[in-house]
Image (tube, grey):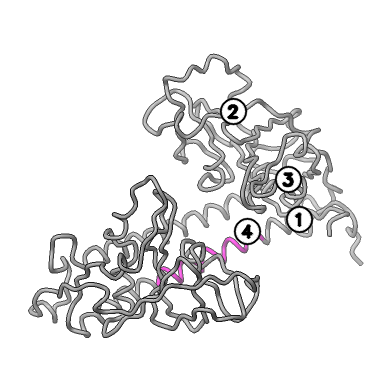
Amino acid sequence: MNNNKNKLVPILRFPAFVKDGEWKLNRLGHVYSFITTNSFSRDDLNYLNGEVKNIHYGDIHTKFSTLFDIAKENVPFINESIALNKFKQENFCKEGDMIFADASEDLKDIGKSIEVVKLNGEKLLSGLHTLLARQINSEIAVGFGGYLFSNDRIKKQIQRESQGAKVLGISATRLSNISIFYPKEKKEQQKIIDCLSSLDQVITAERQRLQVLKEHKKGLIQNLFPQEGETLPKLRFKEFEDSGDWEETTLTQVAYYENGKAHEQDIDSTGDFIVVNSKFISQDGDVRKFTNTAFCPANKGDVLMVLSDIPNGKAIAKCFLVDEDDRYTVNQRICRITPQNLNSKVLYYLLNRNPYFLAFDDGVKQTNLRKEDVLNCPLLIPSDPKEQEAIADTLSSVDELINAQGEKVQTLKLHKKGLLQGLFPRLNNEE
């Protein structure tokens, strides 16, 4: 019999604290008070110099760690031309403060937060679209809040309190209404911090190994393919050193082209075919939608390319190689390129974010590549299929290492997610 049923205790608990009873349940507004923030835009910030750094909500969404150590993060300064004398001492961040992003286009990211755990003596303000929460009575150990607000049970409460249609928002008043829970003893809080932070260190180390592999691959691509103005690569396999210059050609001479087709009626979270759209390619296939209708099927060996992107975006001409047994269908503003007498992986690396396509982005208006733009792309290719295969095999072997390392990182992240669920209790009214 489970004596902890309906009690506010976690499923996983360190032995030293099993007899410590239930965790404390409180309203966020009884534990934290909210401090005034600023509304400085990106134009008011720079990464070169200044006396005060600033948290922009976009950086919470995209790059800052849950436990924010200012020495380990690339944080912009407020421009020195901006007067900061209106800010009182209490407006500056302190260690233990929580900073929430109060706006998001995605429900899962509304209220995403960081905890300031180390300031290293630097001055920091909380800026545009953020909510700065500071403990009233220091009941929570520094570092615990970051993990507490990463817990799905807390995040779901924040999502229910959010408002808006296209852009969701959360106010300090509504955020104050959510229920939070924490061990009464800071020793137990610290034990949880130590456990999760040690796992974070492992994840960070494995992510760094993944990044090293990606940089190695990037270097190989630069050296295995001729650079601009050259007709030979810097690195060439010994058996092909006397094979002469690579051949100049254009895409239209080595591949067939077809535009994807618009089809939004029966796209869902499940289905027989994976829908290839801009988000799918830009997120390396991690964000997936499905359909039961193959309105523009893609076959193994096809290269799928993004044709539209916002100014200075990073998706234009990004490619996806169909190299699996999964079934895909190509949506609008994506093209399907089928190689002819050319190794598909070699073509993928030749086209993916090719500088020829990037030149169409003027940084002002949305970039839209036309069929003729794509087909006129100049290419240099090795004429010997065996040399093409050798390049493809080399890069494939690196891809296998990258994929294995990526899976390792994902496994660790899932383990952390499980710990976040097990080390924190369920609420009695939780569905």
Left-right relation of 71 to 252: right
Magenta residue span: 401-417
| CB contact under 8 Å: marks 2 and 4 | no
From mark 3 to mark 4, how far is it between C-alphas? 26 Å
Mark toward the viewer: 2 or 3: 3
Q: Residue 431, image x and y in percent? A: 84, 60
Q: Is residue 346 above or below residue 62?
A: below
Residue indicated by mark 1? 13
Residue 162 numbered mark, or none: 3
Q: Of the two numbered discs 3 and 4 on the same chain, state the one appearing first in sequence.
A: 3
Q: Magenta span has 225? A: no
Q: Residue drawn at (22%, 72%), measured in percent from left and top? A: 250
Q: Which residue is mark 2?
A: 93
Give the CA separation, mark 4 to mark 1: 15 Å
For the stretch drawn in magenta, what is the main secondary structure? helix
- Taking depth in this image into account, of 55 and 129 the one nearest to the observer is 129
Task: Mark 2: give few (<14), some (14-19) or many (20+) Cα within 10 Å.
Answer: many
Pointer 1 with pointer 2, Cβ within 8 A: no
